[in-house]
Amino acid sequence: MFTATAVWAAPQSPAPADAYTYIIQPTDGTNVPKTFDVKFGLSGMGVAPAGVKLDNTGHHHLLIDLDRLPDLTQPLQASSQLKHFGGGQTETTLTLAPGPHTLQLLLGNYGHVPHTPPVVSTPVHITVE
């Protein structure tokens, strides 16, 4: 018996030019314990769960220790370094190994595709103790 998996790619959605996302907590240069909270911020747009197609909305994706942004024209693929928050979550708790780490947010539309222009935060550099 064969099973088919449909791959559906949503097109990019427009974002207002002044929209931006940011990490509220932790702040850049902070030392954090092994398990810590990350709080997401968004300005100029609203948060909506994945699968909900509304203008000027999206949901967060947290990039952890990525050297470069993923392909901004394709759906973002979840991994240990790219966490999806398709339920519309605006915070999470992370557990990371001791040492330096970089966190960054990237907003995705209803189909996990980054907007045009991309709504991406400034990277936050932390040290896990």
Image: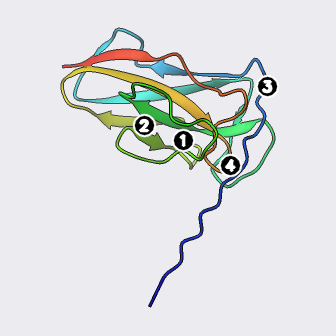
Q: Residue furthest top?
A: 29
The residue indicated by pointer 2 is: 92
- Of badges 4 and 1, the one in the foreground is 4
- Going from N to C along the chain, the mark reached first, 3 or 4, is 3
Locate residue 95, reporting x and y percent: 27, 35
Q: How many residues crowd mark 4 within 10 Å: few (<14), some (14–19), many (20+)?
A: many
Q: Secondary structure at mark 2?
A: strand
Q: Is residue 32 left or right of residue 79?
A: left
Cβ–Cβ under 8 Å for marks 3 and 1: no
Residue 16, numbered circle: 3
Cβ–Cβ under 8 Å for marks 1 and 2: yes
Q: Determine the CA span between mark 4 and mark 1.
A: 14 Å
The three-letter code of the residue at mark 1 reads Gln
The three-letter code of the residue at mark 3 reads Pro
Q: Secondary structure at mark 3?
A: loop
Q: Determine the CA span between mark 3 and mark 1.
A: 21 Å
The residue indicated by pointer 4 is: 110
Q: How many residues crowd mark 3 within 10 Å: few (<14), some (14–19), many (20+)?
A: some
Q: Secondary structure at mark 1?
A: loop
Residue 89, numbered circle: 1
